[in-house]
């Protein structure tokens, strides 16, 4: 079980392949604001809702200087299909060994339909230009999360 992070912590460095096989690293965004979100599985109802929410809010998030990165344990072909089907214009990173998930505490025990299971914790991290966590949000809901995040970021009153 990985340790959960909190606002004020340094964002753990990572590198992972995107859907096209290009390596994406946190250091690529040095001096930029990043929204890093972890989701359980591409092309599932909740994850599709959440990804499309980010897609639909991309222009306003980018206008505020944010770069969005999605991370799952899916393989590259599954991520490519997901991005193509849903017209997702932001990087989706593949982390099948769970190295990035564990670094961010986004994998562990959760309750699913009243049972304790181990799996991906739907989580979102907002990283500032200096690489510090502004927000570390665990067990977020797929629906309405982006709207809630926009309020936390001061984009919406």
Image: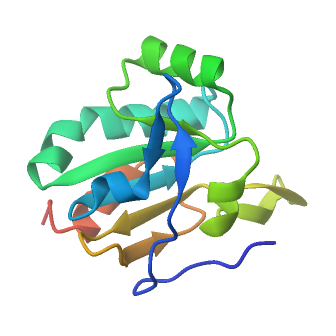
What x and y, as percent, mark residue 156?
Answer: 15, 60
Residue 121 is at least partly visible in this image: no
What x and y, as percent, mark residue 6?
Answer: 50, 83
Q: Is residue 82 above or below residue 5?
A: above
Closer-to-camera residue (96/120): 96
Residue shown at the point (70%, 64%) measured from the top left = 102
Q: Is residue 46 above or below residue 61?
A: above
Q: Please tell me in which quadrant of the rendered image residue 132 appears.
A: bottom left
Residue shown at the point (59%, 67%) measured from the top left = 104
Q: Is residue 38 above or below residue 84?
A: below
What x and y, as percent, mark residue 18?
Answer: 50, 33
Residue shown at the point (62%, 24%) measured from the top left = 76
State how the image is colored: rainbow
Q: Is residue 112 above or below residue 55?
A: below
Closer-to-camera residue (16/49): 16
Q: Which residue ends up furthest to the left in the rendered image?
A: 63
For the image shown, how many numbered marks are present on the structure? 0
Residue 60 is at least partly visible in this image: yes
Q: Quadrant of the C terminus?
A: bottom left
Q: Quadrant of the N terminus?
A: bottom right
Q: Is residue 132 left or right of residue 154?
A: right
Q: Please tell me in which quadrant of the rendered image residue 118 appears.
A: bottom right
Q: Which residue ends up furthest to the bottom in the rendered image?
A: 8
């Amino acid at each position: 079980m990985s340790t959960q992070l909190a606002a004020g912590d340094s964002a753990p460095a990572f590198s992972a392949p995107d859907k096209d096989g290009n390596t994406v690293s946190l250091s690529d965004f040095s001096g930029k604001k990043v929204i890093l979100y972890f989701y359980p599985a591409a092309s599932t109802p909740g994850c599709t809702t959440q990804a499309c929410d980010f897609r639909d809010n991309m222009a306003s998030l980018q206008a505020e200087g944010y770069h969005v990165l999605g991370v799952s344990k899916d393989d590259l072909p599954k991520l490519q299909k997901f991005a193509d089907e849903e017209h997702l214009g932001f990087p989706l990173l593949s982390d099948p060994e769970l190295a990035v998930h564990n670094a961010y505490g986004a994998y562990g025990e959760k309750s699913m339909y009243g049972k304790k299971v181990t799996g991906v914790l739907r989580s979102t991290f907002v990283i500032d230009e200096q690489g510090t966590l502004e927000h570390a949000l665990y067990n977020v809901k797929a629906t309405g999360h982006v709207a809630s995040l926009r309020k936390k970021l001061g984009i919406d009153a």
